[in-house]
């Protein structure tokens, strides 16, 4: 992960936010601690506080001399309306979401393709060149099939609501499962099968409505660049040991891998 999946989105979000790329190890370690659901609450709170303190320095710098990055643009265009803690919260969320999710998609997506060589073969021609027309369908199917964010924040029903044969009373708390929606047999034929040739791969991997991920176009672009680059650079890429399970994250807010051993 550290050699391929993590650097790509980390570099992109650092450039966009104006975060020094040299600081990536620090903010990645904080992200790991913050997203580890098995960690003691005080450790996660401490990681969040450290991240806020770090981002406060960048916001202060942008207040003094706003650059052309997103933090600078927010200060320049909305600085009078946004307090420092609001700017810190926005920037910290974008930094966290901008590298953890896509890096896990790149790692898991690579594992999924290597574990399904028939699907991997559909991506390349006989010369090992990527079929460009297959990249986008493959990415959308991987997003659906993997659904790396298992749930969203709890929602409160504001009125009595009926969904299928279930009544949700007003005031009830509802937890939504994105993977369940992305594997709904009423909407998708054979949802448990990875099939990059689907003519349409409907999914809500990026959420829906006003909570749709604002970074979705960036994530898709990073995957459109990274997957072909990896597969063309290493045409013989394969799992180092197809019989063993890779090292998955456990008790984490984002589904992903700690590491993936490959050969070529």
Image: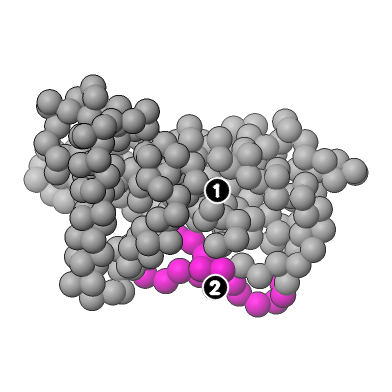
Q: Which corner quadrant of the image does residue 125 belong to?
A: top right
Position above or below: 119 against 43:
above
Q: Is residue 249 left or right of residue 241?
A: left
**Looking at this view, is 55 or 104 the one in front?**
55
**Looking at this view, is 173 or 13 the one in front?**
13
The answer to whether residue 178 shows anywhere in this view is no
Look at the image and give the residue range highlighted in magenta. 241-259
**Looking at this view, is 12 or 122 the one in front?**
12
The percent position of residue 121, horizontal first and vertical second, equals 80, 49
Q: Which corner quadrant of the image does residue 128 belong to?
A: top right
Q: Is residue 244 left or right of residue 215?
A: right
Q: Residue at x 14, y 40 (%)?
A: 84
Marks 2 and 1, how far apart in space? Answer: 20 Å
Q: Main secondary structure of the magenta part?
A: loop
The answer to whether residue 19 shows anywhere in this view is yes
Q: Residue at x 23, y 48 (%)?
A: 57
**Mark number for residue 247?**
2
Front of the two marks 2 and 1: 1
Position of the N terminus, as image quadrant, is: bottom right
Q: Is residue 91 left or right of residue 108?
A: left
Mark 1 neighbour class, 10 Å CA radius: few under 14, some 14 to 19, many 20 or more: some
Q: Is residue 3 left or right of residue 171?
A: right
**Farthest left residue in view:** 171
**How many marks can you see?**
2
Q: Which residue is mark 1?
A: 8
The percent position of residue 12, horizontal first and vertical second, equals 49, 41
Q: Which corner quadrant of the image does residue 216 belong to?
A: top left
Colouring scheme, one of rainbow, by chain, secondary structure, one colour? one colour
In the rendered image, residue 106 lying in the magenta stretch gets the answer no
**Looking at this view, is 210 or 224 the one in front?**
224
The percent position of residue 197, horizontal first and vertical second, equals 70, 39
């Amino acid at each position: 992960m550290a050699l391929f999946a993590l650097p790509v989105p980390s570099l992109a979000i650092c450039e966009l936010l104006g975060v020094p790329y040299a600081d990536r190890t620090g903010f990645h370690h904080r992200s790991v601690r913050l997203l580890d659901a098995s960690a003691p609450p005080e450790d996660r709170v401490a990681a969040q506080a450290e991240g806020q303190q770090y981002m406060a320095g960048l916001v202060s710098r942008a207040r003094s001399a706003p650059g052309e990055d997103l933090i600078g643009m927010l200060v320049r265009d909305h600085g009078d309306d946004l307090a420092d803690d609001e700017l810190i919260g926005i920037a910290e969320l974008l930094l966290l979401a901008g590298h953890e999710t896509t890096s896990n998609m790149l790692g898991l997506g690579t594992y999924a393709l290597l574990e399904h060589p028939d699907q991997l073969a559909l991506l390349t021609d006989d010369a090992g060149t990527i079929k460009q027309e297959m990249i986008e369908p493959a990415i959308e199917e991987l997003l659906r099939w993997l659904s790396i964010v298992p749930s969203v924040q709890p929602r409160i029903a504001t009125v009595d609501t009926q969904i299928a044969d279930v009544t949700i009373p007003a005031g009830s708390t509802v937890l939504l499962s994105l993977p369940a929606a992305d594997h709904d047999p009423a909407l998708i034929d054979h949802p448990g099968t990875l099939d990059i040739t689907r003519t349409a791969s409907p999914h809500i991997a990026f959420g829906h409505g006003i909570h749709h991920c604002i970074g979705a176009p960036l994530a898709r672009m990073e995957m459109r660049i990274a997957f072909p680059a990896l597969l063309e650079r290493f045409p013989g890429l394969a799992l180092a040991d197809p019989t063993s399970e890779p090292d998955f994250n456990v008790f984490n807010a984002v589904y992903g891998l700690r590491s993936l051993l490959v050969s070529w």
